[in-house]
Amino acid sequence: MHPELIDTLVIPNTTKIIFLIMDGLGGLPGPGGQTELEAAQTPNLDALAKGGVCGLLDPVGYGITPGSGPAHFALFGYDPVKNNIGRGILEGAGIDFPMTERDLLIRVNFATVDKNGLVIDRRAGRIDNETNRRICRKLQENIRAPEAVEVMFQPVKEHRAVLAIRGDGLAEEIQETDPQQLGKPPLPPRALVPAAAATERILAAVVEQAGEILADEPRANMLLLRGYAKYRRYRSLYERYLLEALAIAGYPMYRGIARLLGMAIGAPTETVEEEIALLRREYGKYDFFFLHVKATDSRGEDGNFDGKVKVIEQVDSLLPDIVALGPEVLVVTGDHSTPATLAGHSWHPSPVILAAPTCRPDRVAHFSERDCIHGGLGRMPMMYLMGQALAHARRLEKFGA
């Protein structure tokens, strides 16, 4: 079934749907033989699982390790392959950068290289936001734009920034420069198709200059370029599903995904408590709520098993505040798996709970990867989750006679 079939069946209703997304939720067994979710004390999530229906979700496909962009597109019912987009656009949208069709947007990781030019920290020690802003100003004030293009650096958060190249004939088919491992030099921004040759020259010049400008920085002394993308428009959640949607997320990239899909964007938040407080304040104004928790993914990427467990337990302790709002559908899942044992995204499916009065109960009594495979949703592509949520919210009519 193609996910866009759902669009033809949508009917209006006043029911409410909440998607609580714990980024990178899925894990692998750690030192004690349990995953982070299994090791966590989660009485409220377990109760929700017992009263709902559970399963496992594949963000893209079997064996495919997803990036955050395609995984989130799949969560909202968009084919993650057809709608794959470079992270630069997502980051740009997240900071409300005024994008044009002449722009090439690139996600920047500030990184640390040693005296031999080898990467020793791909995230520059997760520099603070003020250092990020200072370095972007330093680059902006000193960079010399090559080949009649405009070069713009914009801070995002911690070690992340956006590089925008504005000009004619730019191409996004460029090799990413992040070597994805330590002890290696940054890769060159090599053109992957002949039409990208001019863009390769421009980016090579920018990277070379940036290395010279940042040479005196103790940590953020190099750029790693990822997620090249040119702007395109997507059909909104309202256009597809008649949902007035609100995104509650702290990290700019996830706010950017939501903005691209036509969601209203809540005020910036720093903690899960602030996110839930915002959800309560705005609950009467919208039909659909995307509530994003980043720290599960961050702890997983840091290889911090115990830290990820603590984040899961914190979310569990606050879950009753969400349940008390009485949404017709409450979904709890991750966009992908980020096992602390791998310190990065993985191809493993993400556990999911869908709680609604119309659920057909299964036998899952504990929210974990091992238990959810026995749930009533089974194992399914993530892009079909939105259809399930809409059906349980009584927002889909019958198909056919």
Image: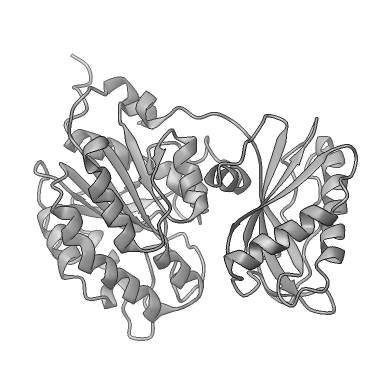
Rendered-image quadrant of the C terminus: top left
Does any portion of residue 338 appear in the rendered image?
yes
**55 over 391 or under it: above or below:** below
Rendered-image quadrant of the N terminus: top left
Measured as percent of width and height from the top left, residue 206 is found at 83, 53
Measured as percent of width and height from the top left, residue 106 is found at 68, 48
Where is residue 98, by image quadrant?
A: top right
Which residue is pictured at 66% across the width and 31% down the height? 100
Display coloring = one colour
Which residue is pictured at 27% across the width and 22% down the height? 9
Taking 64 as reference, is 23 left or right?
A: left
Question: Most extreme residue toward the right, as rendered?
Answer: 147
Foreground residue, 232 or 351?
Answer: 232
Taking 30 as reference, is 259 left or right?
A: right
Q: Tell me how many marks there are.
A: 0
Measured as percent of width and height from the top left, residue 170 is found at 78, 35
Taking 319 as reference, is 195 left or right?
A: right
Which residue is pictured at 41% across the width and 66% down the height? 295
Question: Most extreme residue toward the top, as rendered?
Answer: 401
